[in-house]
Image (tube, rainbow, N blue to C red):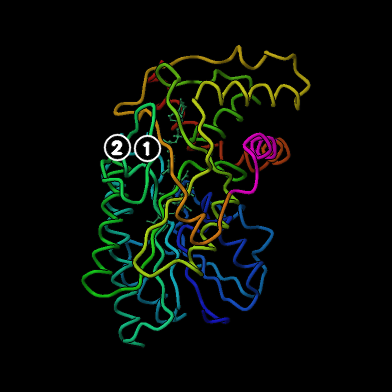
Amino acid sequence: MNNEQTIIITGGAGFIGSHVVRLFVKKYPNYKIINLDALTYAGNLENLKDIEGATNYVFEKVNILDVAELDRVFETYHPDGVIHLAAESHVDRSIVSPLDFVYTNVVGTVNLLNAAKKHWFDTDPTLNAKRFYHVSTDEVYGALGDTGFFTEETAYDPHSPYSASKASSDHFVRAYHDTYGLPVVLTNCSNNYGPNHFPEKLIPLMINNVIHKKPLPVYGDGLYTRDWLFVKDHATAIDAVYHKGANGETYNIGGFNEWKNIDLVKLLCKLADEKLGREDGESEQLITYVKDRPGHDRRYAIDATKINKELGWKPSVTFEEGLSQTIDWYLQNTDWLNHVTSGAYQNYYAEQYAEKS
Ligand code: NAD
Ligand code: DAU
């Protein structure tokens, strides 16, 4: 691959995107990284303060629904690659506002595919060294019972408006490969956790509530299972797939790390109590079972053998280490937490959790 390439990373101000942007800006000083992000409630340039002055980094505030703006960005920078992470990403919000997910996740992805197709075929019809990388989720595969794993061959069976929109976007990316020959690669990853995670998702929401001694809302019976991966390990997987993944292929990414929600929340409480100098068991008392999420998928678990065998990728930290580092990050970054939980977050929280009590 070209040593001096330009890559557009969409959603680079979000949780995972900011870790991917940082990794690429620091690891590849000869690359030019364009962070293209609309800065929705989930996008936050504070996530990138440490690299905002880097000479190989540019921020473009652009909505992927704005076709003219996408044209402008492609014409300005002539990117060699796109790593597409911009999305509406929270299942609970998708249940309240499904159309927002159709617009950004489906229409926005097709807009980007069109921009890449138009500009790349115009400039280099051989599509030499071009790459459109679509970042997706394991939720497209639906739900597992007590056993088994999602592989790259598992049939799609999405249940939430979020996963239905991501499944649809995956199909469009593959269709542009099969129909127009666009060079694409896809990954479907399990649940991420780590620094900069917006506190609407399970782990950062629980950390924030533990800090403030607020109830810890566990949906349903708490026995739902997720496969957790430290966000920096997802970023290294994206690096491996972007550079070494085969054209047209899909790779599953996972942590080999399944936790039932209630066990995870109890571990989090124990670690937080130690760090906050509280009595062992104090935060656990805040656990409150609340009304279940409609259409709640029972279990996700990824078989990540393909990426491990073919590209040599594997997670680098254990869950206990990653969770401990994550809690430390939130305890040390109270300004970040206060900024993102003021204003609109309060209204979201009140509406979302009032319905569940
Ligand atoms: P996030 O919600 O933290 O960030 C999304 C980013 O996209 C934000 O910066 C936001 O401003 C931007 N964005 C949203 N709509 C946009 C639009 N219309 N135009 C331009 N930018 C827009 O999401 P995340 O958790 O970092 O997830 C990133 C990607 O990874 C998503 O595609 C998601 O489906 C996928 N994914 C997430 C997880 C996870 O556990 N969080 C796991 C697997 C896959
Ligand atoms: O699997 C990958 C997906 O993981 C990503 O594609 C999504 O973008 C990401 O949001 C995440 O989806 P989940 O729905 O699994 O994550 P969430 O953190 O919302 O919930 C994790 C589990 O915790 C799920 O079983 C619901 C439960 N939960 C969640 C919240 C917010 C609770 O019990 N209480 C809560 O308050």
Mark 2 secondary-structure assignment: loop
Give the image location of residue 116, x and y in percent. 34, 74
In the rendered structure, the answer to whether residue 310 lies left or right of residue 233 reads: left
Residue carrying label 2: 160
Tell me the quarter of the image containing the C terminus: top left
Asked if ligand 2 lies within 8 A of label 1, the reply is yes
The disc at residue 91 is: 1
Q: Main secondary structure of the magenta part?
A: helix
- Mark 1, other Cα within 10 Å: few <14 / some 14–19 / many ≥20: some
Residue range highlighted in magenta: 315-327
Q: Amino acid at mark 1?
A: Val
Q: Amino acid at mark 2?
A: Ser
Give the image location of residue 193, x and y in percent. 56, 41
Does label 2 or label 1 sit earlier along the sequence?
A: 1
Asked if ligand 2 lies within 8 A of label 2, the reply is yes
Residue 83 included in the magenta stretch of the image: no
Which quadrant of the view contains residue 333?
top right
In the rendered structure, are the residues bearing label 2 and label 1 in contact, judged by CB atoms less than 8 Å apart?
Answer: yes
Give the image location of residue 118, x and y in percent. 29, 79
| Above or below, 222 relative to 300 | above
The quadrant of the rendered image in which ligand 2 is seen is top left
Q: Residue at x 54, y 63 (%)?
A: 239
Which quadrant of the view contains residue 299?
top left
Instruction: Give the CA separation, mark 2 to mark 1.
Output: 7 Å
In the rendered structure, the answer to whether residue 341 lies left or right of residue 332 reads: left
Q: Residue at x 55, y 33 (%)?
A: 203
Query: In this view, which residue lies farthest toward the right?
Result: 277
